[in-house]
Image (tube, grey):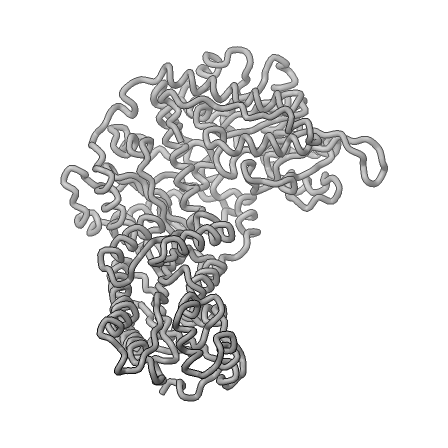
């Protein structure tokens, strides 16, 4: 995302008249909304809203009525669908003016909005609904563009609005969104037909027009005008120049790898957190600047910004000139404690008699001079979006301080937004976190049948999943599929040979920067081989031991090192085999390596217990479907050993089992999930057989 004050690329008018002509009025509203929301220079994720006043037939009376279509509560205009709009009778919304009892009763007006619903639409209307309803124009856009907020957050915001926009834009000082602000915007628009919109102090911009296309083009024009003016008038150097120099890219990543697990472990006691790292030019300009110490404590201005980022970030005292990361790590505990104490003080100073209880007092945004920005939140998407919002805030501070003096929201105003009862009610309506929310999982052999089934099970429970595999093509295919199912934030792939220490180090470094740490490791990479002992070559023996024993050791060692740094426990699961407990003829190398895995897991359970690291084993048997191992010569070898055709092998194994059932990858994944989750919080050093019952492999 370009900084607002460095001659940004121009906003592109993407309106397609031919496409728009095929749409009805609500369809054009959705089209306009998605176009606006696709560019973070126009509005941030979940921020802003759009509306249209549309003629319709009342489903009860058949009479013509005007219906307000407006983005519903909690939506995102860039990704929303048609069902993301609330629909309300405009005449009923106007009738609410007679019920309004003044600023002290703002929140009660939200309770009246459901009574205005048109056609039983279940989408809840947002607090911004009156800000659209009372504007006497058919189409209204509300956005949070960095360029306009930079003007709105300047000390001379009203004068700058006049200077930049002349007589075409109005101005209203900061006020919390609600019914009264809606009345004021409506009055301003009615009394000034020359206005095409209004700048809201410290908040954002509203624009309006008679058609959807005209509204879209007006929004783009106003934002571009602000961006051009800032670029032309910004003082140099930005942020009063550099106080320090950024480390080279590789060194920045090294610091992030070292620091993120340390922070993550310390702030995840009550809720697991996932991390995100950004070292973009905008961020580096800010964290390296002379103005950092002055601007960062002021917090953000736009309500959407600090709802995602907390009122202010934590600036970590790192000196890139000497690069003493060990010293910074040693200072983390008092630094984090001081931030929590400061946040608790803010809560105590500002709380109302009916305020919700204080939420997590840990910082969301961590700024590191010379390095960049780290954000931590309940999941990867939230952490990424929080980072995007703080980049918005940086752009705003850059723009405002470059032409005037930046002003954050007063502390009490910020608190009243953060702990607004309506905001709390929205949080309470959100679904409860899934069982693995905030956890990061690594699955080796991730492109295979058991690996993919396991990754899917963990991702479905809210984990961020890293699939590791030596087969790059199969891995790419698996990651593409998982991205479609679970979203790009929650899935990553790393090419990794489990027998290569350097490859493991690279993979762990990559996943740490991507997600901030690691909680779950599923060692599943494997091969299978069969040969009589006299035909077992040393190469075959070593290959089994290298992948199935040494590989599990190397991955576990890396996991232990990382989990101990986090100091927040973890779960390691070995996918071994029935053959690790029960010998089979003609497979001595494979069986011996699998037995080594099982005993290694027991040894690691002893070492991990004092650190809360649990190590357990799942023993599958005869998982033919979806398995890459069973697609090769191993299947033919086992069929020959059992004196049956290849296509009959699954039935042989089914009949061999006590339960007479086939074992599928999803069955194995279920056992792995149990060990990965808190359901097995008091289990370590244990084994689950997923083999449909086999007496000779009962654990003893």
**From where the camera sits, is residue 555 visible?**
yes
Q: Measuring 35% from the left and 72% from the top, which residue is drawn there? A: 528
Quadrant containing the C terminus in the rendered view:
bottom left
**From where the camera sits, is residue 95 visible?**
no
Residue 103 x %, y %: 59, 33
Q: Is residue 581 above or below residue 597?
A: below
Residue 552 x %, y %: 29, 68
Residue 662 x %, y %: 52, 76
Quadrant in the picture for residue 609: bottom left
Q: Measuring 32% from the left and 40% from the top, which residue is drawn there? A: 373
Q: Going by the image, does 429 lie left or right of 338? A: right
Q: Going by the image, does 109 lie left or right of 77? A: right
Q: Nearer the viewer, residue 581 or 136?
A: 581
Q: Nearer the viewer, residue 561 or 142?
A: 561
Q: Measuring 53% from the left and 44% from the top, which residue is drawn there? A: 423
Residue 236 x %, y %: 28, 19
């Amino acid at each position: 995302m370009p900084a607002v004050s460095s001659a940004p690329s121009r906003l592109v008018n993407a309106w397609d008249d031919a496409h728009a002509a095929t749409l009805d009025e609500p369809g054009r509203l959705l089209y306009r909304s998605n176009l606006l929301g696709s560019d973070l220079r126009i509005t941030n994720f979940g921020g802003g809203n759009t509306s249209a006043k549309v003629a319709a037939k009342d489903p009860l009376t058949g009479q013509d009525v005007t219906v307000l279509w407006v983005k519903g509560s909690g939506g995102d205009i860039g990704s929303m669908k048609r069902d993301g709009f609330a629909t309300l009778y405009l005449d009923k919304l106007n009738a609410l003016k007679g019920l309004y009892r003044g600023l002290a009763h703002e929140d009660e007006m939200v309770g009246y909005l459901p009574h205005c619903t048109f056609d039983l639409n279940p989408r809840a209307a947002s607090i911004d609904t009156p800000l659209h309803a009372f504007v006497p124009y058919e189409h209204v856009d509300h956005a949070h563009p960095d360029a306009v907020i930079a003007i709105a957050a300047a000390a001379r915001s009203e004068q700058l609005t006049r200077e930049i926009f002349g007589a075409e834009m109005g101005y209203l000082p900061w006020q919390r969104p609600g019914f009264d602000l809606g009345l004021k915007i409506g009055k301003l628009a009615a009394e000034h037909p020359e206005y095409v919109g209004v700048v809201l102090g410290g908040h954002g911009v509203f624009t309006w027009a008679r058609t959807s296309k005209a509204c879209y083009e007006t929004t783009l024009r106003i934002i571009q005008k602000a961006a051009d003016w800032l670029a032309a008038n910004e003082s140099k150097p930005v942020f009063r120049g550099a106080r320090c120099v950024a480390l080279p890219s590789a060194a920045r990543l090294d610091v992030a790898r070292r620091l993120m697990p340390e922070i993550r472990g310390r702030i995840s006691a009550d809720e697991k957190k996932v991390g995100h790292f950004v070292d973009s030019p905008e961020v580096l300009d800010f964290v390296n600047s002379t103005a950092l110490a002055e601007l960062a404590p002021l917090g953000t201005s736009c309500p959407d910004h600090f709802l995602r980022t907390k009122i202010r970030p934590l600036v970590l005292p790192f000196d890139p000139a000497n690069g003493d990361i060990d010293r910074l790590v040693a200072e983390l505990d008092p630094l984090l404690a001081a931030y929590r104490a400061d946040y608790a003080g803010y809560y105590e100073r500002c709380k109302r008699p009916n305020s919700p209880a204080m939420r997590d007092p840990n910082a969301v945004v961590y700024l590191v001079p010379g390095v960049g920005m780290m954000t931590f939140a309940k999941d990867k998407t939230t952490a990424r979006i929080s980072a995007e919002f703080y980049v918005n805030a940086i752009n705003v501070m850059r723009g405002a301080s470059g032409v005037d003096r930046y002003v954050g929201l007063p502390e009490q105003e910020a608190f009243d937004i953060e702990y607004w009862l309506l905001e709390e009610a929205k949080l309470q309506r959100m679904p409860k976190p899934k069982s693995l929310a905030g956890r990061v999982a690594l699955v080796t052999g991730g492109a295979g049948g058991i690996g993919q089934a396991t990754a899917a099970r963990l991702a479905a429970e809210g984990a961020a999943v890293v699939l590791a595999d030596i087969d790059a093509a199969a891995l790419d295919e698996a990651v593409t599929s998982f991205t479609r199912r679970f979203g790009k934030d929650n899935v990553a792939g790393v090419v990794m040979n489990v027998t290569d220490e350097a490859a493991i180090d690279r993979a762990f470094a990559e996943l740490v920067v991507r997600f901030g740490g690691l909680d779950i490791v599923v060692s599943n990479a494997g091969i299978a081989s069969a040969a009589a002992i006299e035909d077992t070559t040393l190469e075959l023996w070593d290959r089994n031991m290298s992948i199935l024993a040494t590989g599990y050791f190397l991955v576990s060692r890396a996991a232990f090192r990382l989990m101990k740094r986090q100091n927040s426990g973890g779960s390691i699961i070995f996918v071994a085999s029935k053959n690790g407990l029960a010998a089979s003829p003609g497979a001595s190398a494979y069986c011996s390596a699998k037995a080594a895995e099982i005993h290694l897991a027991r040894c690691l359970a002893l070492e991990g217990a004092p650190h809360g690291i649990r190590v357990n084993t799942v023993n599958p048997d005869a998982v033919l479907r979806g398995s890459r191992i069973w697609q090769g010569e191993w299947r033919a070898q086992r069929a020959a050993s059992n004196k049956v055709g290849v296509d009959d092998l699954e039935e042989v194994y089914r009949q061999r089992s006590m339960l007479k059932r086939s074992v599928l990858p999803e069955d194995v994944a279920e056992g792995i999930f149990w060990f990965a989750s808190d359901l097995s919080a008091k289990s370590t050093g244990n084994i689950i057989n997923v083999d449909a019952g086999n007496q000779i492999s009962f654990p003893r």
